[in-house]
Image (tube, helix red, strand yellow):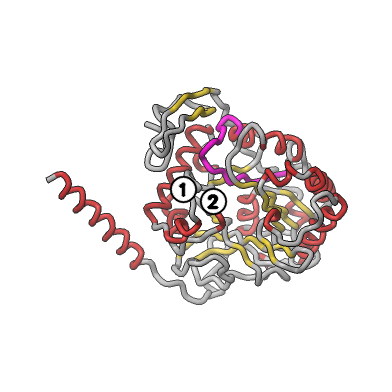
């Protein structure tokens, strides 16, 4: 009897999910008269607010993906901490964090230093096709639940976690964007474009149909009001091949060529700066910077350079969305108050060994909250 009831319940959940997908309205061509800031923007290379390029702040988005641990925190401390933009505001960066092996005390340290914490899923499981086929309920468990997990164990205010990036940059049609909307988050930063690079594509909402090229389908087709896309404008390597992640470029400079790497980064930056000033993304995995000292040194030299430019600002990803909602000229932007993360002190707790439901491995976990009963995982994000 219990088994029959369980099967019936699962059937009802499946039917409800299917109906939810069917009820989503198909996105129509963008109506520029109806789609107005701050809540709606058509997908476009046009500069928000109709500003001229020379009056537009050039935003630089440095992002790192995957777990935060005692190895990569040293890179972050040595390359990012203590930086300021020319307006005196602290320089930003965004970390799209996956759960397994993450040290939540270090996540809190990054947040407390003014950086942005985003979501990169609980499991980051393989194969890539899993994410392409994932439905709303699955992605809700991976991201909405991870948001609760990150807030709880990292002591980060829930409302400060506003962005996500899909593993392998693999989109899942409408499902992941539905999760963003239903969970109260703001933006996705998973979607590469190789078509809109000169000029680059600015952030936009999914109220209307996107004209962005779909590199890793399925891409969204529904109208999802107020959900923002932060396009990953591709770089070009030395053979003119596009690459969304810096460490995935097919033909980069020699890995021991510091000057070559500095020129490589600068050339890709200038494609934005001397065009429509769409946000320039430096999207990378930390291991690549740590493994190759020439890349690390070139990265630092590039950051030193832009931090001294009067119209270039290294910011958190959410800061870009906030500017697009209310675009102001660079001279006015420079005089605005600096964004700050509200204090949220960590209560350091070292937990373990913790048993897990997904493996026989036992885990130690550095937390900013009380210890869970078991290692937190998909379906049990707080480890109850």
- Residue 214 place in picture, x, y as percent: 56, 69
- Residue 274 place in picture, x, y as percent: 81, 65
Q: Residue 143 carries which label?
A: 1
Q: Which mark is residue 346?
A: none
Q: Mark 2 points at which residue?
A: 164
Instruction: Name the residue: 66% across, 38% down.
Output: 114
Could you tell me which secondary element the residue under label 2 belongs to? strand
Q: Is residue 307 visible?
A: no
From the viewer's side, name the closer residue of 149 and 261. 261
Judge whether 207 appears above or below 112 on screen.
below
Q: In which quarter of the image is residue 338?
A: top right
Residue most extreme to the right: 259
For the image, the number of numbered tags is 2
From the viewer's side, name the closer residue of 88 and 64. 64
Q: Is residue 242 magenta?
A: no
Q: Does the magenta stretch include residue 94?
A: yes
Mark 2 touches mark 1? (CB < 8 Å): yes
Label 2, residues with CA under 10 Å away: few <14, some 14-19, many ≥20: many
- Residue 158 place in picture, x, y as percent: 49, 40
Q: Quadrant of residue 261?
A: bottom right
Residue most extreme to the left: 1
From the viewer's side, name the closer residue of 124 and 325. 124
Pointer 2 or 1: first along the chain: 1
Left or right of 367 in this view: 285: right
* Range of magenta residues: 91-106
Q: Alpha-carbon distance for marks 2 and 1?
A: 8 Å
């Amino acid at each position: 009897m219990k088994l029959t009831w369980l099967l019936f319940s699962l059937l009802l959940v499946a039917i409800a999910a299917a109906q939810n997908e069917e009820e989503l309205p198909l996105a129509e061509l963008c109506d520029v008269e109806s789609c107005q800031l701050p809540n709606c923007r058509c997908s476009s290379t046009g500069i928000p607010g109709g500003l001229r390029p020379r009056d537009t702040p050039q935003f630089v988005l440095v992002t790192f993906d995957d777990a935060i641990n005692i190895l990569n925190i040293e890179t972050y401390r040595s390359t990012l901490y203590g930086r300021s933009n020319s307006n005196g505001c602290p320089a930003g960066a965004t970390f799209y964090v996956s759960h397994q092996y993450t040290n939540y005390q270090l996540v809190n340290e990054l947040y407390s230093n003014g950086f942005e914490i985003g979501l990169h899923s609980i499991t980051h499981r393989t194969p890539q096709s899993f994410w392409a086929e994932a439905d709303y309920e699955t992605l809700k468990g991976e991201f909405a639940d991870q948001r609760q997990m990150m807030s709880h164990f990292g002591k980060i205010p829930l409302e400060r976690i506003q962005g996500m990036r899909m593993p392998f940059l693999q989109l899942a049609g409408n499902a992941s964007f539905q999760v963003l909307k239903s969970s109260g988050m703001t933006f996705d930063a998973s979607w590469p474009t190789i078509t809109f690079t000169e000029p680059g594509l600015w952030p936009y909402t999914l109220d209307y149909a996107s004209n962005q090229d779909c590199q890793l389908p399925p891409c969204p087709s529904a109208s999802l009001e107020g959900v923002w896309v932060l396009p990953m404008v591709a770089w070009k390597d030395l053979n003119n091949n596009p690459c969304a992640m810096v460490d995935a470029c097919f033909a980069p400079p020699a890995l021991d060529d510091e000057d070559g790497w500095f020129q490589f980064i600068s050339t890709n930056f200038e494609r934005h700066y001397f065009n429509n000033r769409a946000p320039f993304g430096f999207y990378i995995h930390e291991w690549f910077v740590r493994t190759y000292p020439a890349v690390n040194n070139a990265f630092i030299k590039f950051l030193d350079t832009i931090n001294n430019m009067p119209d270039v600002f290294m910011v958190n990803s959410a800061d870009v969305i906030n500017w697009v909602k209310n675009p102001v000229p660079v001279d006015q932007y420079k005089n605005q108050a600096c964004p700050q993360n509200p204090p949220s002190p960590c209560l350091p707790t070292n937990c373990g060994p913790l048993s897990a439901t997904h493996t026989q491995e036992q885990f130690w976990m550095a937390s900013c909250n009380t210890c869970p009963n078991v290692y937190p995982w998909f379906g049990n994000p707080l480890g109850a």
